[in-house]
Image (tube, rainbow, N blue to C red):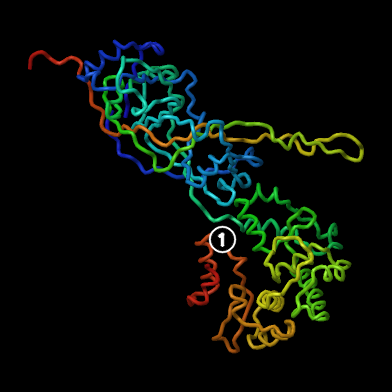
Amino acid sequence: MTSHVGMNEASCSRSISDINSILEFAKLDPADFRPQVQCLYFSEQLENDAVKLMELEAPLQEALQAGKRLEIRGDPGDGAVIVTENQTFEVKEAETSNSMLMIPSLVYGSNIPDEGEQNIANQQVSSIIHNYFELKRVKPRLSKLRALLSENPFRGTECEGDEQDTGKKYTFSELQHKVQASDAELKEGLIKMNACELKGFWRLLDFEYASTVLYHILQLCEERDWLHSGLSMVECLEVLEELFPGEVIKHLVRSHAKTDQDSMETDTEKDVYYFCEDKICKHFAELCLKNSGKFNLNDFLRVWQESVSDGMQTSLAQIEGMALIDSDARPPVIWYYNVDLLPEDVNERFEVLFEERKKWSLEDITPYIR
Amino acid sequence: MSPQSVKRPSLVSPKVEEKEKYFGCFSPGDAAGQKEWGIVELQGDLETRHPVPLSGKFIGDIHFTHKDAPVLIIGHHILQGKVITLEKPLAVLVKSSRPDSGASEMDTRSDDKLQPMTKPQSSTTYLVEAIITKKILFKTRPKPIIAHVPKKL
């Protein structure tokens, strides 16, 4: 559809009488209107791409008004996301068949005096816009974080720089740019993935290596009866720092134990730590299952219980989301199936899950879809 | 003008661009939150009779009634509109490029020569020029102005 714009008027030359004569043609009475008339002109620098419009969700508006910067994150080619300090929003571009005329200094009726002499305000349309960005809150896209950190897991100080040490290592600021998550979600993801900051780089610990260090820590605990009285970080570091980096020891203790004060974040080495039975048991189950294929369930339960420290009790509830059991098989079997390795996308995840099993009971599938 | 059915907006996912790799960010402009731009939304497009650039051309007059109802007169058409408060405010973003702050960092190497740590990277910044909370929407069929009423039927 077309509306023909007057071609003959020179720029900004309308007079009150021009305006009133068209009102008269239109059978409209100037007295019915507020005295200020706004005459619209296209700007001499009309540029439709000069500005973009973006619908603001409340958290983004609050952040902007508080003077915060929002960042676009991801590698080139990733679907764009915008993050606040703690949320991630997917960006979609919407097109509309309507024309939006952008008029920077347009005055709305309520701001125009109700009475007075007729007067003219010339208004410039700086651009005509047909599209805008919509934002949708999404979950952080953390599977990339796992993939990046898996490029070069830490296998011990002596392995740094060896022939296998070829993968890239990432600092927090590099991860900020590549991973599509807000800072808070990224930090949470790193903690959940059990990543550890070593010499400025965020690393996953190689599972075999972490098992070795944890084994030494637990051995020491048994020697000194720390499982009951609590582990002293200072003493633990004194003994084991010769063998392993202090950061790794601290990281493994903190991720498998609690302090009295529950102060996981603090760096006070004077804290006393108490190991969590569930976390230790889960670690040993992973050690048994990870590279074993299908394992006779009863054999597994026996080996698992024998592998954990004295006084700890294993239970299948501890390894929900880490292993699947086929009780109909003769004999029943268990195998490694970790929720952390499933796709993030809901549809993809269901597809993978139903490739694994044609039928799921609600109880079995729940740990994998939470 | 003729009425046009309103199409559902089509949605596409914009991709992160190469130059936005480092610091694509929005910074609030000086007056963000205070400055409010106006939007006049029309169905369809504005066209001139001849394909000439629109820059500088006159479009029409906007009047407000005493009850704040907007009336737009374009050429020989009257449009009755409404001021609408947006469900979600719109940010007006202006793209600007500037060198990365990190690009000027120097690294003293053992050979005592100053070397830039990274090649200068330009980054894209979107400044929030204004936040828009309402617009004028003209969605009714435009009424023609009949300039010369015949004297006799």
**Residue displayed at 86% across by 38% down:** B108
Taking depth in this image into account, of A141 and A164 the one nearest to the observer is A141
Residue projecting furthest to the left: B153
Residue A173, given in percent of the width and then of the height, sits at 70, 48
**Residue displayed at 52% across by 48% down:** A90
Residue A347, given in percent of the width and then of the height, sits at 50, 62
**Kind of residue at badge 1:** Glu
Tell me if A286 is positioned left or right of A119 in this view. Answer: right
The chain that hosts pointer 1 is A
Taking depth in this image into account, of A311 and A296 the one nearest to the observer is A311
**Residue displayed at 41% across by 28% down:** A101
Taking depth in this image into account, of B24 and B7 the one nearest to the observer is B24
Residue B43 in sight here: no
- Vertical side of A143 occupied by B141: above or below: above
Residue projecting furthest to the right: B111
In which quarter of the view is residue A297 placed? bottom right
In which quarter of the view is residue B96 placed? top right
- Vertical side of A57 occupied by A98: above or below: above
- Vertical side of B23 occupied by A140: above or below: below
Task: Say how many tags the image has.
Answer: 1
Residue A59 in sight here: yes
Could you tell me which secondary element the residue under label 1 belongs to? loop
Binning the other alpha carbons within 10 Å of mark 1 as few (below 14), some (14 to 19) or many (20 upward) gives: some
Tell me if B69 is positioned left or right of B109 in this view. Answer: left
- Vertical side of A329 occupied by A17: above or below: above
Where does the N terminus of chain A fall, quadrant-wise? top left
Residue B106, given in percent of the width and then of the height, sits at 81, 36
Tell me if A65 is positioned left or right of A282 in this view. Answer: left
Mark 1 = which residue? A344
In which quarter of the view is residue B22 placed? top right
Residue B67, given in percent of the width and then of the height, sits at 27, 29
